[in-house]
């Protein structure tokens, strides 16, 4: 996933994807990834922006494959993995428990779990963020690449 995000970013723009888990599992375990620009070819023009049709395609895919969106991942151009003001104000899925992962440096180079920002959406209470060792402790990655 990291390599694919880097390739889609092309060293010049942000990229991202939705993280999907089986509907039947109560504890989310990511089983599939759908990249923003596969849902909306114009999603990566400048910052990340998805049109309404992209979400229709996402929900259709989830229904067909019996999956649900549990989070999203997107890149930032520098090593800062805090949420931007835009990220905080516009969760990709405004559902309590949604996880947003921010990957530094447009996913270029070696990225480890402790390098990312992990942000949990709490609805009206905003976000809880974890970084470094805390993010690594919360993020289990079966295969990180």
Image (spheres, grey):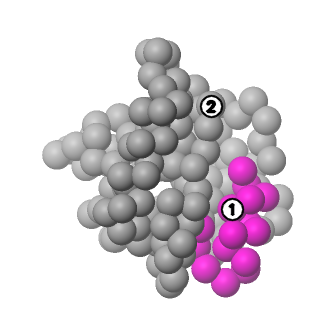
Q: Residue at the spot x=41%, y=72% of the render?
A: 49
Q: Residue at the spot x=47%, y=15% of the render?
A: 24
**Mark count:** 2
The answer to whether residue 84 is magenta is: no
Q: Residues within 10 Å of mark 2 (few under 14, many from 20)?
A: few
Q: Is residue 69 left or right of residue 106?
A: left
* Depicted 79 relative to depicted 98: above or below: below
Q: Which mark is residue 5?
A: 1
For label 1, the SS is: helix
- Residue 141: where, in percent of width, then height? 70, 34
Q: Residues within 10 Å of mark 1 (few under 14, many from 20)?
A: many
Q: Is residue 143 visible?
A: yes
Choose top left, top right, bottom left or bottom right for residue 81: bottom right
For label 2, the SS is: loop
- Residue 22: where, in percent of width, then height? 52, 24
- Residue 97: where, in percent of width, then height? 35, 35
Q: Residue at the spot x=69%, y=69% of the render?
A: 8
Q: Is residue 108 left or right of residue 78?
A: right
Q: Earlier in the sequence, mark 1 or mark 2?
A: 1
User: Which one is in front, 122 or 38?
Assistant: 38
Q: Is residue 73 left or right of residue 120?
A: right
Q: Which residues fall within the magenta stretch?
A: 1-16
- State how far apart marks 1 and 2 are (Cα): 17 Å
* Depicted 141 relative to depicted 42: above or below: above
The answer to whether residue 7 is magenta is: yes
| Residue for badge 2 | 31
Choose top left, top right, bottom left or bottom right for residue 133: top right
């Amino acid at each position: 996933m990291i390599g694919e995000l880097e390739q889609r970013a092309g060293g010049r723009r942000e990229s991202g994807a939705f993280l999907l888990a089986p509907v039947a599992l109560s504890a989310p375990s990511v089983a599939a990834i759908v990249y923003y620009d596969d849902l909306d070819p114009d999603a990566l023009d400048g910052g990340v922006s998805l049109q309404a049709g992209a979400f229709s395609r996402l929900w259709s895919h989830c229904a067909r494959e019996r999956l649900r969106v549990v989070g999203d991942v997107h890149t930032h151009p520098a090593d800062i993995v805090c949420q931007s003001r835009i990220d905080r104000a516009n969760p990709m899925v405004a559902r309590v428990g949604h996880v947003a992962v921010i990957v530094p440096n447009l996913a270029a180079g070696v990225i480890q779990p402790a390098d990312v920002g992990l942000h949990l959406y709490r609805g009206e209470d905003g976000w809880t963020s974890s970084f470094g060792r805390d993010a690594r402790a919360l993020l289990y990655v079966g295969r990180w690449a």
